[in-house]
Amino acid sequence: MKASVIIPNLNGAGWLRDSIESIWAQTEQDFELIVIDNGSTDESREIARSYRGRDRYTLIENDHNTGFSHAVNQGIAIARGEYVALFNNDAFAEPDWLAELLKAAAADPKIFAVSSLMLRYYEPELADDAGDYMTILGFACKRGDGLKASRYQKPCRVFSACGGAALYRRSILDQIGVFDELFFAYYEDVDLSWRANNFGYKNVYCPTARCRHICGATTGAVRYNPFKSIQSGRNSILLPYKNQPALMLAVNFLPMALGYLLKVVMFRHRGFGNDYAKGYAEAKAALPRVDKPKFYWRNLPNYLWVEGSLIAGLFRYLVYRLQRALKIT
């Protein structure tokens, strides 16, 4: 089997059926579909059950919300495909979405993840995500968020694939590991892609693999809310701590400290300062449980590539903030 498409669902009654139907309508049909219901209390669980008996369909039902990482890991554990594709329950794929992802991945065996062009559902001329990047300030950012999708029509290497609509090579997942369940939600996809970067694999962006996305439909946070603020504060600490070797952490300590200070000011300005501080406290408690990958000298060129990407990400972020301030799309 070529691919296993995994859709995690939590209370997605308003959009889950359309999301599933967009997968069944793919031009590439050599796939299975796995839906993981994460303790839904609305009609979406019955929607997911309505597909039982259909060929190439599996439903896993959890009795509570186990978090994004645990849910998709359940799907990966039973997946039979050569590739694993993650797809949000509030995303809707164009018919050749999966075929284009597979074609991009086949171009190079060193490609680990392929990121889609995610378009804003209500403003499809604007990008929601065209791959993710990191900055030396410790920020994880969505490439192209709110800018014209026409700017992002060239394939390229990216720091991370957005797990809302991405393809992963199963053989590399088996080597480097699956999603870290210490990341309950948010940044778990960046953590996985960063791990792949450290091992010398590539994450790429495929502009012809397109889908539309209702941003924040599941968490109720288009930008921020208390839950997202806590997770952001927590995981923004765990992410660079886990993936940077000790020397890199020391070199980047001052810019990251500045970045965290700026985040504190920003979240307090938006009314979520206490939630963000709670995330910091949770990160401190979680640090001893971080499974920090072992340092290998043979990976030194990969660490240097990552460092260069963090520095380049800072300039990308500053340009983006300037564009948003000037209302340039």
Image (spheres, rainbow, N blue to C red):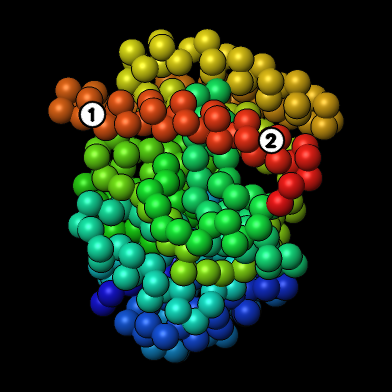
Kindly identify the amino acid type of the residue bearing the numbered disc 2.
Arg
Q: Which residue matches tag 1? A: 301
Q: Mark 2 points at which residue?
A: 321
Foreground mark, 2 or 1, reads: 2
Q: Is residue 276 above or below residue 101?
A: above
Residue 206 falls in image quadrant = bottom left
In this view, the residue in front, 239 or 248, is 248
Secondary element at tag 1: helix
Crowdedness of circle 2 by 10 Å Cα count: few (<14), some, many (20+)?
Answer: few
Query: Measured along the vertical axis of the image, is residue 238 above or below residue 86?
Result: above
Quarter in which the N terminus is drawn: bottom left
322 and 237: which is toward the camera: 322
Residue 155 percent coordinates (x, y)? 41, 58
Q: Which residue is pictured at 52% across the width and 10% down the height?
A: 254
Residue 300 placed where, x, y %? 22, 25
**Which residue sits at x=75%, y=21%?**
265
